[in-house]
Structure formats: C-alpha cells, structure tokens
Amino acid sequence: MSPEVATVEAPLSAQAPKPHTDISDASAIRRVLVRDVLGQAYSAMRHDLRKTVLTMLGMAWGIATVVLLLAYGDGFGRAIQAIWDSYGSTAVGIYPGRTSQQAGGNKAGTQIHFTQEDVEMIRNVVPLVKHVSRALDMSTTVQAGARSFTFTTLGIDPGIQDIWNLSVSSGRFINDEDNYSHAMYAVLGSETKDKLFSGMPAVGEEIRINGVAFQVVGVMNPRMQEADNDDNRVVYIPFHSMDTLQSTHYVGGLWLDSFGLDHTKVVKSIRDSFAAAHSFKSNDERAVFVFDAQKQLEQFGVITIGLKILLAFIGTVTLGIGGIGLMNIMLVSVTQRTREIGVEKALGARKRDILFQFLAEALVITAIGGICGILLSYLVSFSVGSLTLYSALAKYGEAGDIRLIVSVKIILIATTILGFVGVASGMFPAVRAAKLDPIEALRYE
C-alpha cells in the first residue's frame, strides 16, 4: 500500500501551487487582452485620422469652454468679495431717522438723535463687538497755502480704520491718544492730498479747516470710488476735535464690526436696543437706518452661485455638442468595421470585449481632447489676464475686476463633466457594436 500512497501523494503535492499559476496566467491574459484592445483602438483611430482629429478638437473646445466659464464664475465671486472687502465687508452702519409709527406716547415723525449713551449701549448689547466708531461729517472749506477747496470733514474714532478697511499711504492714522487729547491732527484722503499739495509731501504740513489750524499726520491710499462718491476727497479728524467746527453733542452715526457673530442677530439686537432707548417700535425701520454689509454680500453671493450654475450648464451643453460629434464618428466606425466585429466574435470575442474595445476608443479620444482643452484654457487664462468689471464703474477699482484663474477644483469639476460626456457618448455605439450578430456581421458588405 505504501508505494501506492506515495504515487498518489506525489501528484497531489505537485498540484498544490497550481491555483496560483492559474491566477497569474489569467492576469497575464487579461493584460495582453487590454493591450490588444487598446492597440486596435489606436489603429482604428489612425485609419480615419482626419475625423479623429476633428472630433478631438471638438472635445478640446468643449472642455476649454467649461474650464474658462467656471474660472469666470469663480473670478466674478472673488471680484465681488474684493469690492466689499475694500469698503469693509463686516461693517454695520447705524444712522438716526424719523419714526413712521406712533409708539409710547410719541407721535410719528419724531426725530431720533444719537448721543454718547448710545455708544455705550452698543458696546453692552453686542458684547463681541470688535470696534465701534462715532461718525460726524460736515462740508468744510480746507485751505493749504494759497489753495482752497471744499471737502467733507469726518470726525471719527480710530476704530473706523479697521471697520472701513482703510490703509495709510504715508504717516499714520488717528489714534486713541489724539482723540482723548482733542489733538488738532488730520488725515487726508488721496485726492484731497493731490489737490492741496499736488506732488509735494503733506505729512507734517498745516491745513486750515473752516479757518481752524490742523496738522497733517497721514495720507490714505486710494479707495475704490464710484463717480458720485467722495471717498477719496475727505479729511479725517479725531471725533473729539470736531467740536472746534460744530457741536458734537449729537452723534451723526455709528459704525461697528464684530467677531463672527450672526449678522442678522446683531442687526435685530441693535434695532431692539435703540427702540427701547428711544421709545419707538422695533419694526419701524425708518426710525433707525441700519446698513449691514454682510447682508449685501450674501445677496451678491446668491447671484454669484446662480451665475456659476448657469455658466457650468452652458459649458456642459457646449461639451455635449462635442460629445454628439464623438458619438457620430463612433457609430460610423461601428458600421465600417462590421465585418471585423463579426470575425472577432467568430474567433471567440465576447460582448464585453467588443464593448470595451469601442468604449476605450471613445475614451482615448475624449482624454486626448480633454488634455488639449485644459492646456488651451491655461493658455487663454494667462494671456487674457483680467477682465474689466468694477474698474469700468469706479476709479481705483482694478481689484474688483475678474481674473481667470484655473484652479485645481475647476479642473476636477471639468474632468468629471468630461468623463461623463465621454462615457455617455461612447457607450451607445459600443453597446450597438457588442450586440451585433456575428453571422449577420460576417455577411455585411
């Protein structure tokens, strides 16, 4: 029995590694099959090179359109953000008005006045407020030497620099010490400096505002300024020094910003507090005017999202037209190679092999066209630079123009759309080729 056992056991031990051999053979066959299929797809594309190149150009144009439109949408959003940042994107302005409703024994039409007590109330109502600034303005005659012009003079607190995102070109801005000491210092807007001093340095010089002497301690950088605004034709002085020009008992308005609070809750708390302090209804919006920059920015954000969706849809439709061209050339290819498909099926090719062959050909065309289109979009974005938007409406508005920047996110979105269009365009001809009857295909002339 032992010899027989030995003869039985030997073949069993020899067969032990056979499953691993089968797996490696199957993977090798699969690699060869994939290589052959891709080789056939490449040969088929070379057979009708002109149509293939034209189809690739259509796909390249489509994907370049998608990328550039998405880049335009992103650039529009960045431009809107830059515009609001230049004015202070978190600023909240509060100005008194007249009541429009009767409340607490006060008739409608009562004038509301802000005082120093209201400033302290704001600090208590909004505990996470970063900066609060009083604002009081008047039209004044400003004189420097023999030059004299009419400018708006603003009495403000130092916090306005951060609230309005002001930047100093030379010198410095008003500080707390200037305010507490009633210092006779002034900071000039960029155009104010140009008119009063032309190309001469202004810091350290003396100007007279309605006949009162002030020393220039700083000059501001230009701000974005629309035609009807005087943002650069102003003079900033400490609020407490404003009493040399007019009474500061009543505050013209208040400005503030806060640490990331829900701006709608901030505005509501402001209205409720002023309504309680000045005896008017909190829903009387004419009694106190509240400007909320974040609310305005959110509204533009909705417009930006809608624009991005529209541009992405237009780009997808354009790419879809290229996909239709791809589908047509693949259907023609299926018709021209009907006998070839029949021979492949007669030699044992399965439906999925034929499907993969034609789908691979469509995806290769899509991929090459996509790469060319993305490179084209980069070339266009670099060559165009910026597109005019806000600079057409405002001086110094170049930061609010649209810049085409092709980001990684845009490439990923465009590639996803391209892949979907490529698969959708190549699948129908591939399925049609896979379903051909081998006998009928061999008879095809």
Image (spheres, helix red, strand yellow):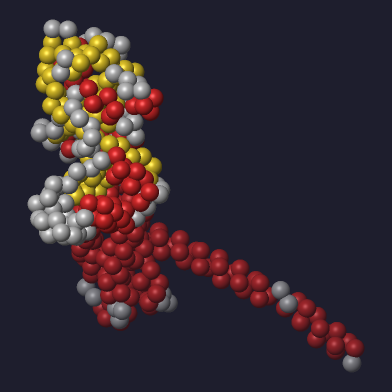
**The C terminus, quarter of image:** bottom left
Q: Is residue 28 left or right of residue 190?
A: right
- Residue furthest front as drawn: 105
**Residue 147 placement: quadrant:** top left
Q: Position of residue 45 (x, y in %)?
A: 30, 57
- The structure residue drawn at horizontal position 23% and vertical position 35%, both measured from the top left corner, is 249
- The structure residue drawn at horizontal position 62% and vertical position 73%, both measured from the top left corner, is 22
Q: How many marks?
A: 0
**Residue 388 placement: quadrant:** top left
**The N terminus, quarter of image:** bottom right
**Residue 173 placement: quadrant:** top left
Q: Nearer the viewer, residue 379 or 443?
A: 379
Q: Is residue 415 left or right of residue 384?
A: right
Q: Position of residue 201 (x, y in %)?
A: 27, 10
Q: Nearer the viewer, residue 107 or 444?
A: 107
- The structure residue drawn at horizontal position 55% and vertical position 65%, both measured from the top left corner, is 28
- Residue furthest top as drawn: 146
- The structure residue drawn at horizontal position 22% and vertical position 22%, both measured from the top left corner, is 244
Q: Please, is residue 51 above or below residue 182 in the view?
A: below
Q: Position of residue 7 (x, y in %)?
A: 82, 84
Q: Please, is residue 376 above or below residue 435 in the view?
A: above
Q: Please, is residue 43 above or below residue 202 in the view?
A: below
Q: Position of residue 251 (x, y in %)?
A: 23, 37
Q: Is residue 254 left or right of residue 357?
A: left
Q: Nearer the viewer, residue 398 or 235?
A: 235
- Residue furthest bottom as drawn: 1
Does residue 339 appear in this view?
no
Does residue 355 appear in this view?
yes
Q: Is residue 138 left or right of residue 188?
A: left
